[in-house]
Image (cartoon, rainbow, N blue to C red):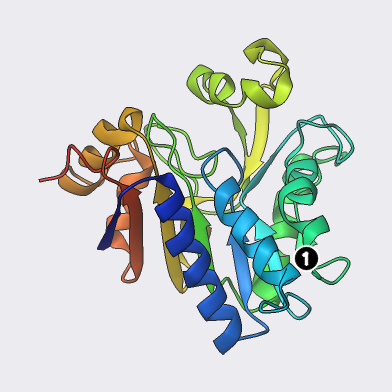
Amino acid sequence: MIISLCDDPQDVADLAAQRVADLLHDSPRAVLGLPTGRTPILMYDLLAEQHAEGTLDFSQVSTYNLDEFVGIGEDHPGSYRAYMRRYLFDRVNLTSGEGHVLDGLAADPDAECARFEEAIDAAGGIDLMILGLGANGHIGFNEPADRLQARTHRVRLLEPSRQANAGFFGGDPAQVPAEAMTMGMGTILKARRILLLVTGAEKAPTVGAMINGPVTPQLPASFLQLHRHVELICDTEAASALR
């Protein structure tokens, strides 16, 4: 794992955006795996700015989002589809239909997960997967557990994950859906390259355990140790527990 240490969250965003821009310049038809949450917003702002300046083209890009809540539609302000429209999709020239997000209102969530997995395979797999890190070590919505599922699947969210997403639901964790759909760790690890973006002192113990500890389903992020091309981009606060 490559560790790129940055001074602050803005520097993390600058480097992450540069990695994405470099890929799109070299491979205009790249397939991206994209996260939501607070951490990538600054990166999305920079990518949108580069597009507005005419230096970054998304017209041939395909994207696949990590996860989505079960039971809410794309027009719900807390949905990840709405998030992606707000922070990236509506700000760049991504071709209609090429920003792929799981359908939270699918009549059969399990079938929706299978469809999404097949769509990723049909696209040739993900060239660059961008990830955030949950304080409890989750990646996407792969929560700490006795075992992890490899492929895109339905999951019941643990309370820390609902609390972390409360800001998108009026600050009330009880309003966050109890279930979600998420890419599995196997799907994530099949990506050709992975960027993990982490900021803030509250993530430092998890970063330390992820890097220095064993590979365990109780800390899903630890499975990134098994991938041959991962870059951790973090600020000094997030890296403070690293040896």
Image coordinates for residue 91, horizontal then vertical, percent: 79, 59
Where on the picture, by quarter, is residue 68?
A: top right
Position of residue 64 in the picture relative to residue 12 (left or right) = right
In the rendered image, the residue lying farthest to the bottom is: 26
Say if 166 sits above or below 41 in the image: above
Image coordinates for residue 17, horizontal then vertical, percent: 52, 64
Q: Residue, x 40% and y 32% (percent of image)? A: 144
Say if 167 sits above or below 200 in the image: above
In the rendered image, the residue lying farthest to the left is: 243
Residue under pointer 1: 92
Q: Nearer the viewer, residue 92 or 8?
A: 8
In the rendered image, the residue lying farthest to the front is: 53
Q: Residue, x 58% and y 21% (percent of image)? A: 162
Q: Nearer the viewer, residue 5 or 173?
A: 5
Position of residue 225 in the picture relative to residue 200 (left or right) = left
Image coordinates for residue 120, horizontal then vertical, percent: 67, 67
- Looking at the rendered image, the quarter that the N terminus falls into is bottom left
Position of residue 66 in the picture relative to residue 170 (left or right) = left
Q: Nearer the viewer, residue 155 or 228?
A: 228
Q: Residue, x 83% and y 56% (percent of image)? A: 90
- Tag 1: amino acid: Val
Image coordinates for residue 20, horizontal then vertical, percent: 54, 70
